């Protein structure tokens, strides 16, 4: 891994992805071996949007590597309410931390922040843009359950505003993966993402559908997403879509027994709880994989940036 930041999954080659996933698998098998590896490291958490999994798994990951975290806390309790700009906030916090994790509602915010700081910066979600660390744990989960090559994946739900989808789709072009995108017309993948995917992949392995039915039997993985209500400019538009594209046991009748169902979580009502107890469900495992994968990523970035005090 030769990057000192992670802003979009477009910057990741297949070799980069495999380096992180292999390291995560090693750490997962023997977490005690890295318990003091970054004993003096400080990770700065800057979350300008709600987060449960991403923030807590970054925190767990840093602590399990022996380091510690500092957390800006909620926007309401920070100097942001006094009018501080994002640019000033990141420039200040970089002086307190060895690496920064940023989540912000504005698309492009991580790219801007990265230009201002010298410590490694990880994009934990920029509006409807990208969420590359989620992608790495998604890929880890896919690799464990279905394998990354000769993969047929269906990605369903809010493909327009879903940043986890944009990042995952780009990353999958590094592998022998057939990608099927299932959504209502109004929530299709942004055309620029489709364009990029076609550029990366000659378009032969990317297909768009408005119904799951026709494609379900051929899928190895079904990646379901939440309709991103908070990003709809008009609540009425959300209400028209809400409740569509849900799956339950009946929906999965025509699926392969081997189908892996994933979701970045939080879910609202996209996946019926009756699926949780089946062998299809991999979404809680997926969320748990956030810890070894983020440990691997932090280990690689901090080691490259002089943060590795063991060697
Ligand atoms: C996602 C996000 O924040 O983009 N959640 C996550 O990080 N696991 C998905 C979502 O909010 O629907």
Image: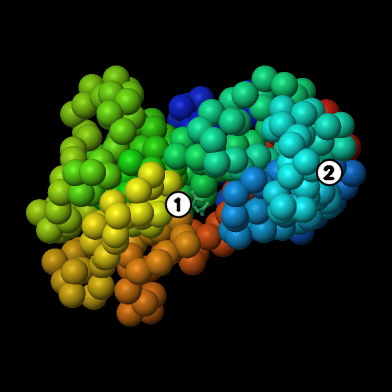
Can residue 69 be seen by looking at this rendering? Answer: yes
Vertical relation: 245 (above or below) 168: below
Q: Is residue 248 left or right of residue 128?
A: left
Which numbered disc covers residue 257? none
Residue 136, horizontal then vertical, whole percent: 51, 43
Question: Disc 2 or 1, which lies upstream in sequence?
Answer: 2
- Is residue 150 visible from the viewing direction of this image? no
Q: Quadrant of the N terminus?
A: top right
In the rendered view, would you say 75 is above or below 12? below
Q: Is residue 48 left or right of residue 230?
A: right
Q: CA distance from mark 2 to mark 1?
A: 31 Å
Cβ of mark 2 under 8 Å from ligand 1: the answer is: no
Q: Residue furthest left?
A: 214
Q: Secondary structure at mark 1?
A: helix
In the rendered image, residue 26, in percent from the top left (x then y), is placed at: 63, 50
Q: Nearer the viewer, residue 38 or 234?
A: 234
Observer-side mark, 2 or 1, equals 1
- Left or right, 43 with reference to 56: right
Identify the disc placed on residue 42.
2
Residue at point 67% right, 20% down?
115
Which residue lies at the image location 50% right of the left edge and 40% below the top edge?
A: 127
Residue marked by disc 1: 230
Crowd rating for badge 2 (residues with CA inside 10 Å; few <14, some 14–19, many 20+): many
Judge from the rendering whether residue 10 lies leftward or rightward of residue 201; answer left or right: right
Q: Under tag 2, what secondary structure?
A: strand
Spot occupied by residue 18 in the image (x, y as percentages of width and height): 51, 37
Q: Few, some or many C-alpha atoms within 10 Å of disc 1 (few <14, some 14-19, many ≥20)?
A: few
């Amino acid at each position: 891994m030769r990057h000192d930041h992670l802003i979009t999954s477009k910057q990741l080659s297949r070799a980069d992805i495999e380096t992180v996933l292999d390291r995560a698998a090693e750490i997962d098998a023997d977490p005690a071996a890295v318990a003091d590896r970054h004993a003096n490291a400080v990770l700065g958490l800057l979350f300008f949007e709600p987060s449960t999994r991403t923030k807590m798994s970054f925190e767990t990951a840093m602590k399990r590597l022996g380091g510690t975290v500092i957390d800006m806390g909620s926007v309401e309790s920070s100097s942001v309410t006094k009018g501080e700009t994002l640019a000033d906030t990141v420039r200040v916090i970089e002086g307190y931390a060895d690496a920064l994790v940023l989540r912000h509602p504005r698309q492009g915010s991580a790219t801007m922040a990265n230009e201002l700081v010298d410590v490694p910066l990880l994009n934990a979600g920029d509006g409807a843009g990208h969420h590359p660390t989620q992608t790495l744990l998604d890929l880890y989960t896919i690799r464990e359950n279905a394998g990354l090559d000769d993969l047929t994946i269906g990605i369903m739900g809010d493909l327009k505003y879903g940043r986890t989808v944009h990042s995952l789709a780009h990353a999958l072009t590094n592998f022998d993966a057939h990608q099927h995108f299932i959504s209502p017309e109004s929530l299709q993948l942004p055309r620029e993402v489709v364009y990029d995917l076609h550029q990366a992949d000659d378009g032969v392995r990317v297909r768009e559908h408005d119904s799951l039915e026709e494609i379900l039997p051929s899928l190895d993985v079904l990646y379901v997403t939440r309709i991103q209500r908070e990003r709809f400019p008009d609540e009425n538009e959300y209400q028209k879509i809400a409740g569509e594209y849900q799956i339950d046991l009946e929906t999965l009748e025509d699926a392969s027994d081997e189908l892996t169902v994933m979701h970045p979580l939080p879910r609202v009502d996209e996946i019926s709880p009756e699926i949780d107890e089946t062998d299809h469900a991999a979404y809680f495992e997926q969320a748990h994989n956030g810890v070894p994968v983020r440990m691997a990523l932090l280990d690689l970035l901090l080691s490259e940036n002089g943060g590795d005090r063991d060697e």
